[in-house]
């Protein structure tokens, strides 16, 4: 949570009129709330290990749904009437052990969700310490972040940010 004051300070120091024509890069901040805030402050590019790091520990980024923890529920995105924000699920939680029919995120278009890898299967991979589980969550989380950035770019083009 100490990232937000530093982000505000960094954006105010980079807001001089001479820097408007140069891209501003933010390194190491990768959670959705910080990226959304940074985009509103005029930062242009982001680089972080966040989506793959949390994937290695069993956390999947998901669009807001029942059972998702935390996240950004501000309703912004492509269409405020359909985008409900985000959350996270920890696939190692016992409740996913028997979710054979549920994919990570039914609204996601990543390879993991499209191919129908179930939450139960992913749970099994993590409990069995199979590296494939880490790889599949990394693929999913990176696609989630790419979709987030597409929504932010779209909002910028529409002059909403």
Image (spheres, rainbow, N blue to C red):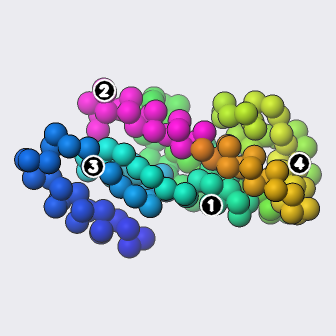
Front-most of residues 97 and 18: 18
Mark 4 or mark 1: name the one nearer the start of the chain: 1
Q: Quadrant of residue 107?
A: top right
Q: Is residue 152 left or right of residue 161?
A: right
Mark 3 or mark 1: name the one nearer the start of the chain: 3
Circle 3 is placed at which residue position?
24
Q: CA distance from mark 3 to mark 1?
A: 24 Å
Q: Are marks 3 and 1 in contact (CB under 8 Å)?
A: no
> Does residue 20 belong to the magenta stretch?
no
Label placed on residue 158: 2
Label placed on residue 121: 4
Magenta range is: 143-161
Q: In the displayed image of the protein, which residue is found farthest to the bottom? A: 2
Element under label 4?
Answer: helix
Q: Are marks 2 and 3 in contact (CB under 8 Å)?
A: no
Q: Is residue 12 above or below residue 85?
A: below
Q: In the displayed image of the protein, which residue is found farthest to the top? A: 158
Q: Main secondary structure of the magenta part?
A: helix
| Residue at screen point 80% across, 63% down | 93
Label placed on residue 145: none
Q: CA distance from mark 1 to mark 2?
A: 32 Å
Element under label 2?
Answer: loop
Q: CA distance from mark 4 to mark 2?
A: 40 Å
> Does residue 148 belong to the magenta stretch?
yes
Mark 1 or mark 2: name the one nearer the start of the chain: 1
Circle 1 is placed at which residue position?
53
Q: CA distance from mark 2 to mark 3?
A: 20 Å
Mark 2 or mark 3: name the one nearer the start of the chain: 3
Element under label 1?
Answer: helix
| Residue at screen point 42% across, 70% down | 1
* Of marks 1 and 2, the one in the foreground: 1
Question: Residue 153: percent from the left, percent from the top?
Answer: 38, 33
């Amino acid at each position: 949570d100490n990232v937000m004051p530093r982000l505000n300070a960094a954006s105010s120091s980079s807001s001089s009129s001479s820097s408007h024509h140069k891209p501003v890069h933010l390194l190491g901040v990768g959670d959705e709330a910080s990226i959304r805030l940074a985009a509103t402050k005029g930062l242009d590019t982001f680089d972080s290990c966040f989506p793959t790091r949390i994937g290695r520990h069993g956390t999947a980024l998901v669009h807001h749904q029942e059972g998702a923890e935390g996240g950004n529920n501000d309703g912004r995105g492509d269409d405020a009437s359909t985008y409900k924000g985000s959350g996270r699920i920890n696939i190692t939680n016992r409740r996913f052990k028997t979710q054979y029919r549920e994919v990570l995120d039914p609204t996601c278009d990543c390879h993991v969700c499209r191919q129908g890898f179930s939450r139960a299967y992913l749970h099994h991979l993590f409990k069995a310490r199979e590296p494939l589980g880490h790889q599949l969550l990394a693929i999913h989380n990176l696609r989630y972040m790419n979709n987030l950035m597409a929504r932010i770019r779209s909002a910028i083009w529409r002059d909403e940010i």
